[in-house]
Amino acid sequence: MSQRKINILITLLASLLLLVIFLDRFIMVNGPATSSIVFRPFSGGVNMHKVYGEGIYFTAPWNTVYSFNTREQMVEDTMHIMVQNGVTVTMRVNYRYRPIIDSLPVIFRRYGLDYDKVFIDPLIVSSTSEVISHFTPEQVYSLSIDSIRQVAQEIARRRLNQGNVFLGELVISNIKLPPKVVDAIEYKLRQEQLSIAYNYKIIIAQKERQIKIIDADATRSSQALVNPGLTPGYLQLRQIEALQNLSLSPNAKTVVVPRGNSTPIILNNGQ
C-alpha cells in the first residue's frame, strides 16, 4: 500500500473517530415529553423563536442544547408560616405544575434550568403565606382548609401564569398549631360555651319570673273582684244549700256543727 493511501486511510479513521466523539454535538435527540432550546454563541445567544419538541434534530457543534421535562410534575412540601401573635403554623402543601412549552426560551432566560427552585417554589410559599399570615391562631383553628386552599391557589396560579408556568391543583392539608396554642384555644372555646349556657339559663329564669309575676297579678285581680261578694250572709246561704243536698244523699253522714259561725264539718260514716 502506497504512502498516499495510508495517509488517506489515517485521515478517514481520524475523521470517523472525531465524528463518533462529537456526534452528540451534531445531533439533538428529544425523548417523550421533552423539549429543547438552543444557545447559539455566534448567532445572538438563546434562540427565542424556536422550541424543539420530541424527535431528532441536527445542530451546529458549537451550539449548546438545554432540555426541559414538559410533563406535569408533582411537588410535596412542608411549610412553616407565622400567623398573627407570632405563632408558627405547620402545613402540608402539594401542587402540580408544568412549563408553557412555547415560552421555554423566556423561562430559561429569566430563571435558568432550575426555574422550579428559583421561581415556582418561592412563589408557592409566598402566596400561601400571604393568605395564612393575616389570620389569628383562633381563626386558623376554626377555618375551613378548602377556603384557604382556594384563595392561595388563585393567587399562585395568577402569578405563575405571568411567569409562563401553568399551575394545576394546589392542595393544603394537615394544618397544625403548636400544642400549647391548641390547648389554650380549646379552653377558651369551652369557657365561651359555658358562658352561652349560663346566659341561656338566666334568660329562662327571667322568663319564668315574669310568668309567675303575671300569674300572681291575675290571682290578685280575680280575688279583688270576688272577695267583695263573699259576705257572711252569702256564705251561710251556700252552707244551707250544701246541707240540703247532703240530706238527700242515700249515704249515712255525720254533720258536726261547731259553735259560732264556723263552717260545719261533714264526716262520711262509710270510711
Image (cartoon, rainbow, N blue to C red):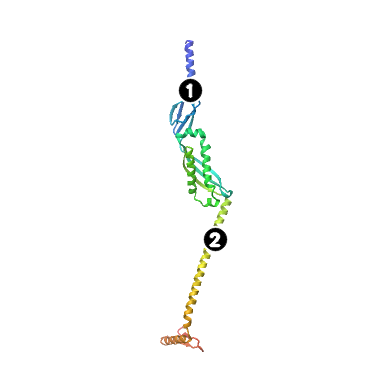
Along the polypeptide, which appears first: circle 1 or circle 2? 1
> Decide: marks 1, 2 in contact (CB < 8 A)?
no
Q: Is residue 77 visible?
A: no
Give SS at disc 1: helix
> Circle 2 is placed at which residue position?
195
Give SS at disc 2: helix
Q: Residues within 10 Å of mark 1 (few under 14, many from 20)?
A: few
Q: Is residue 57 visible?
A: yes
Residue placed most toward the observer, 82 or 109: 109
Identity, as a three-letter code, of the amino acid under mark 2: Ser
Residue placed most toward the observer, 66 or 178: 66
Image coords of residue 218 (percent x, y): 48, 75
- Number of numbered tags placed on the structure image: 2
> Circle 1 is placed at which residue position?
20
Image coords of residue 87 (percent x, y): 58, 48
The CA distance from mark 1 to mark 2 is: 85 Å
Q: Residue at x 43, y 28 (%)?
A: 56
Relative to residue 130, is residue 40 depicted above or below? above
Identity, as a three-letter code, of the amino acid under mark 1: Val
Relative to residue 44, is residue 124 depicted above or below? below
Image coords of residue 49 (percent x, y): 45, 30
Location of residue 30 (image quadrant): top left
